[in-house]
Amino acid sequence: MSDSKFSLSRRGFVGGCASLLASPALAQSTTVDGAGTVEVERDISEVVRRNISSFRSLKWQPYFANLKGGAVLVDTTSRALHYWSEDQATYKLYPTSVPLTEELTRLGRTKVVRKVEGPSWRPTPSMRKRNPEWPDFVGPGPDNPLGTHALYLSWTYYRIHGTHDTRKIGRRSSNGCIGLYNEHISELFALAKVGTQVLLI
């Protein structure tokens, strides 16, 4: 598939949202018994109008001192990932999944320390505690929660990765990582380098 099909512009996103208005529901967060936010299904027509303005292109200067090695900005509020190349010739904007709760969300500066195509996956100790039924290991393939590619960050256990479950994108659905459509992580994987600076806000 061509780059133009998957590179989102504001016009393309608005057009896509218009076509989604026929769909019955979209996940939104709500507070339950004071225990934090969880995802619930809501009427998409109510939500899309509110979210279109937050999914917009940004300038890199408010967030980074320079673009050495390229830069990735993850906005967990608008659930979007922005990428700028070092020479400023390339800018990408992708929808993402974000962590389920604030407790699972880590914000701040990090960087890409490793790139893996066809990653394997093991649940972290905290994941195992919360979900003892999960397998100890999942190899590369369609059942892997990391999708087709993963960018490992300097923070232990944190990654920007793909997902085979496209329903997760745009939702609070991860255990701490940032998820992208497999087509988008493949593109970002080719652009980002080991050392690319990353900021989560």
Image (tube, helix red, strand yellow):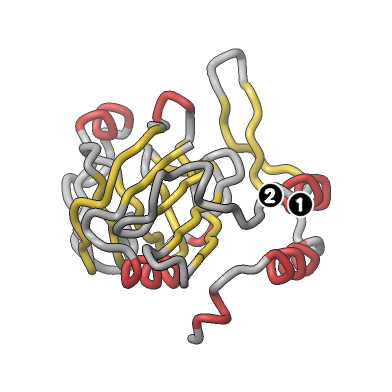
Q: Position of residue 148 (x, y in %)?
A: 31, 67
Q: Neighbour class for label 2 at 10 Å: few (<14), some, many (≥20)?
A: some
* Residue in the foreground of this view, choosing between 75 and 47: 75
Furthest residue in direction bottom, as rendered: 1
Q: To which quarter of the image does residue 141 belong?
A: bottom left
Q: Neighbour class for label 1 at 10 Å: few (<14), some, many (≥20)?
A: some
Residue highlighted by disc 1: 48
Residue at 62 percent across and 57 percent down: it is 57
Can you see residue 38? Answer: yes
Residue at 19 percent across and 56 percent down: it is 114
* Residue in the foreground of this view, choosing between 30 and 60: 60
Q: Left or right of 90: which side holds 38?
A: right
Residue at 28 percent across and 38 percent down: it is 133
Kindly indicate whether the residue at mark 2 contacts the one at mark 1 (C-beta within 8 angstroms): yes
Q: Could you tell me how many numbered marks the image carries?
A: 2
Q: Position of residue 136 (x, y in %)?
A: 17, 45
Residue highlighted by disc 2: 26
Q: Nearer the viewer, mark 1 or mark 2?
A: 1
Residue type beneath disc 1: Val
Residue type beneath disc 2: Leu
Residue at 66 percent across and 40 percent down: it is 28
Mark 2 lies on a secondary structure that is: strand
Q: Earlier in the sequence, mark 1 or mark 2?
A: 2
Q: To which quarter of the image does residue 196 belong?
A: bottom left
